[in-house]
Image (cartoon, rainbow, N blue to C red):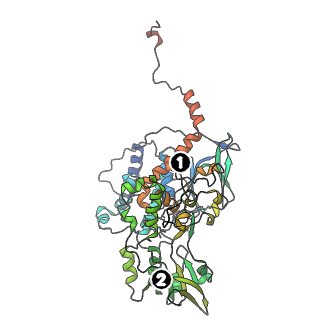
C-alpha cells in the first residue's frame, strides 16, 4: 500500500537533468531497478477479527525512517511509524542539537542504505550543484533535518506524528500466535507482530542529571535536551557541567546569547579525540557485534568511557569568547539556592551561578522509560548475562540491555517472557551489544539491513505453517502441455 515505487517503471533519462524533481524520479527508478525479489510474501494476521500490523516502529528519526524504508524494500509494507514530535521536528537536529553543523564528516552515508540517489550528497547537489557540495565543510544540522523530511516524503513512508507509545504488553493473535499490544497517548491500542524501538539517545534510559541539580528550581537549571530560553540568560552567569560535545554546544549557545559561561570538566583534561572516528571501518562496524562478550565489553566500554571529543569547530565556537572559562579536574558535589544565586559545591570550593546546564549525556535505565516501565523487570541486561574480569567492572555498562543477534530484547528469566523476542531495539542501548548501530549515522548502511533481516526472519518463522500451506497450494503453471503429443508407454 505504501510501496508504490516497488515495481513501477520509471523511464527517466537523468543525464544533464538537475533539481529535486528529477532526483525524486531517479530515486524511484533506482528502487524499482533493484526491487528484486518483487513477490509479496506477507500473510494477513488477525486479532479479534481485525488485521494486525506486521511492524510498528516507534520513533520517526533517521533510524525509524530508514528501518521503514528497508522493510518496504523487503516487501513488508503493513507497517506504521509513530513519533511524538510534530512533523519535521523528530530527533535532535532542529530542537536541542545546539550545533550549526553535524559532527560527522559529510561523506558518511546513512539513511540512503546505499541507494546513491537517496544520499544526502545527491539531495544537496540536486539543489545547489556539485561545486557547492565540494566547497561544503560539514553538513548544516537544519539541512540534515530537511533531508530527512524529504527522504520520508520521496519514499512515501507511513508516519504518524504527535502520538506517543506509552505502554507495551504481550497479546495473542486469533490463530494463537504471538503479538504485542502497544498503547498510544490517544488511548488506542495497536496490535503488532513486531515492534522496533527507534527512540533515540534516551530510548532505554534517561538524560543524566544528578539529583542535587534536579532539586534546584526548574527555572534555574536545565538538562541538555530541554527547551532553554537562552535570551533569558543574557548577562547572567551560567555554569555548564560536562565537557563533551553536547555540553560545549550548550556553552556556545549561551555565550552567543550574551551569557558569561563557566564549564566544568571532571577530568584533568578534556578529550580532544573522537573514538568514533577510529571505529568507522567496515570490519569493526560489521563484526564487533559478533565478537565474544568480553571483547564487546572491553572495546565498547573503553570507547564509551573516553567521552566523546568535541569537534574543532565547536572548540573554536566557545574560544571565540574571551570570557569563556573551562575548569579542569573540578566536579560538582552538591548544589542549592543561596539567596538569589545557585551555590554549586565542587571538589575545589563553592561556585556561584545564576543558571546551571547539565550536559552529561545519557545513561541506560530501562526502568526510566514510561513505555517500558511495565516490562522493564523482564528485560535481560548485560549484568544478568556477563561477569567482567576483576578490574573491568563498570556499573554504567551493566545497565545496557543484552540483545539477541536480531537486536531483540532477551528474557531475564528464560521462558518467562518469550514475547520480548518481538521487541527490537535500535538505539544507543544497542551499542554495547553491536557497537555503533542504532543512533549513529556511520553504521546505518550496515546495521539497518541487519536489523530488518532479524525482523523479517521472525515474521517468516511466525508464518511458516501458512507458507507451507501456500507451497502445497501453489499451482501456477509455466507451460500448458499438449497431452496429444505425449506418449504414455
Ligand atoms: C546533540 C546530538 C548531536 C548528534 N550529532 C551527531 C552527528 O553529527 N553525527 C552522528 O552520526 N550522530 C550524531 N548524533 C547521534 C545520532 O545520530 C542522533 O542521536 C540521531 O538523532 C539518532 O537517530 P535516531 O533516529 O536513532 O533517534 P532520534 O533522531 O532521536 O529519533 C527518535 C525519535 O523517537 C521519538 N520517540 C521517542 N520515544 C517515543 C515514544 N515513546 N513514542 C513516540 N515517539 C517517541 C522522538 O520524538 C524522536 O523523534 C547526535 C546526537 C545528539 C543528541
Q: Position of residue 272 (x, y in %)?
A: 37, 74
Report if the beta carbon of the residue with label 2 is closer than 8 angstroms to ligand 1. no
Name the quadrant of the N terminus: top right
- Which image quadrant is residue 323 in? bottom left
Q: Is residue 218 something that shows in the picture?
A: yes
**Helix, strand, or loop for circle 2?**
strand
SS for dot 1: helix
Between 188 and 179, the residue placed more toward the observer is 179
Q: Is residue 166 visible?
A: no
Side of 324 relative to 182 (left or right)? left
| CB atoms of marks 2 and 1 within 8 Å | no
Residue 354, percent from left and from top? 55, 88
Instruction: Residue at 61%, 40% (x, y): give it.
Output: 44
Q: Residue furthest top?
A: 489
**Foreground residue among 119 and 191:** 191
| Residue 276 x, y percent position in the rendering | 40, 65
The one of 407 and 3 positioned closer to us in this rendering: 407
Q: Nearer the viewer, residue 477 or 328?
A: 328
Image x and y of residue 111, in percent: 44, 56
Q: Residue furthest toward the front?
A: 390
Q: List the residue tagged with mark 1.
A: 455
Residue picked out by circle 2: 264
Query: Residue 255, relative to residue 3: is it above or below?
Result: below
Extreme residue in the right direction: 48
Amino acid at each position: 500500500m505504501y510501496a508504490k515505487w516497488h515495481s513501477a517503471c520509471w523511464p527517466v533519462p537523468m543525464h544533464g537533468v538537475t533539481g529535486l524533481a528529477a532526483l525524486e524520479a531517479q530515486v524511484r527508478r533506482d528502487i524499482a531497478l533493484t526491487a528484486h525479489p518483487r513477490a509479496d510474501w506477507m500473510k494477513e494476521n488477525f486479532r479479534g477479527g481485525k488485521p494486525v500490523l506486521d511492524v510498528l516502529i516507534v520513533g520517526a528519526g533517521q533510524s525509524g525512517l530508514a528501518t521503514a524504508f528497508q522493510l518496504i524494500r523487503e516487501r513488508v509494507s503493513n507497517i506504521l511509524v509513530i513519533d511524538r514530535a510534530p512533523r519535521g521536528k523528530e530527533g535532535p537536529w532542529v530542537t536541542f542539537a545546539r550545533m550549526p553543523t553535524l559532527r560527522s564528516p559529510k561523506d558518511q552515508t546513512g539513511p540512503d542504505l546505499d541507494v546513491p540517489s537517496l544520499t544526502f550528497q545527491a539531495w544537496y547537489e540536486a539543489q545547489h550543484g556539485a561545486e557547492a557540495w565540494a566547497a561544503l565543510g560539514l553538513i548544516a544540522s537544519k539541512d540534515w533535518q530537511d533531508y530527512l523530511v524529504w527522504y520520508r516524503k520521496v519514499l512515501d513512508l507511513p508516519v504518524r506524528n504527535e502520538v506517543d507509545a506509552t505502554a507495551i504488553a504481550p497479546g495473542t493473535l486469533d490463530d494463537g500466535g504471538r503479538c504485542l499490544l502497544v498503547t498510544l497517548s490517544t488511548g488506542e491500542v495497536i496490535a503488532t507482530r513486531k515492534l522496533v524501538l527507534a527512540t533515540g539517545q534516551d530510548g532505554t534510559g534517561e538524560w543524566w542529571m544528578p539529583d542535587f541539580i534536579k532539586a534546584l528550581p526548574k527555572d534555574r537549571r536545565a538538562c541538555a535536551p530541554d527547551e532553554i530560553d537562552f535570551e533569558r540568560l543574557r548577562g547572567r552567569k551560567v555554569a555548564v557541567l560536562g565537557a563533551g560535545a553536547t555540553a560545549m554546544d550548550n556553552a556556545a549557545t549561551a555565550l552567543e546569547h550574551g551569557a558569561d559561561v563557566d564549564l566544568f570538566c571532571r577530568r584533568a583534561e578534556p578529550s580532544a579525540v573522537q573514538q568514533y572516528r577510529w571505529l568507522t571501518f567496515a570490519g569493526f562496524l560489521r563484526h564487533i557485534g559478533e565478537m565474544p562478550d568480553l571483547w564487546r565489553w572491553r572495546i565498547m566500554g573503553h570507547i564509551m568511557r573516553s567521552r566523546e571529543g568535541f569537534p574543532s569547530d565547536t572548540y573554536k565556537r566557545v574560544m571565540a569568547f574571551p570570557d569563556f572559562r573551562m575548569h579542569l579536574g573540578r566536579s560538582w558535589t552538591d548544589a542549592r539556592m543561596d539567596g538569589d544565586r545557585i551555590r554549586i559545591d565542587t571538589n575545589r570550593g563553592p561556585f556561584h551561578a545564576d543558571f546551571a546546564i547539565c550536559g552529561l549525556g545519557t545513561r541506560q535505565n530501562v526502568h526510566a522509560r514510561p513505555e517500558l516501565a511495565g516490562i522493564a523487570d523482564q528485560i535481560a541486561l548485560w549484568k544478568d548475562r556477563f561477569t567482567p574480569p576483576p578490574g573491568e567492572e563498570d556499573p554504567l555498562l551493566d545497565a545496557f540491555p543484552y540483545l539477541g543477534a536480531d537486536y531483540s530484547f532477551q528474557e531475564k528469566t528464560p521462558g518467562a517472557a518469550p514475547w520480548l523476542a518481538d521487541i527490537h531495539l535500535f538505539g544507543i542501548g544497542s551499542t554495547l551489544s553491536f557497537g555503533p548501530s542504532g543512533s549513529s549515522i556511520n553504521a546505518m548502511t550496515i546495521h539497518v539491513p541487519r536489523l530488518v533481516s532479524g525482523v523479517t526472519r521472525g515474521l517468516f518463522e511466525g508464518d511458516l505453517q501458512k507458507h507451507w500451506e501456500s507451497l502445497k497450494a501453489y499451482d501456477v503453471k509455466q507451460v500448458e502441455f499438449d497431452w496429444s503429443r505425449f506418449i504414455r508407454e
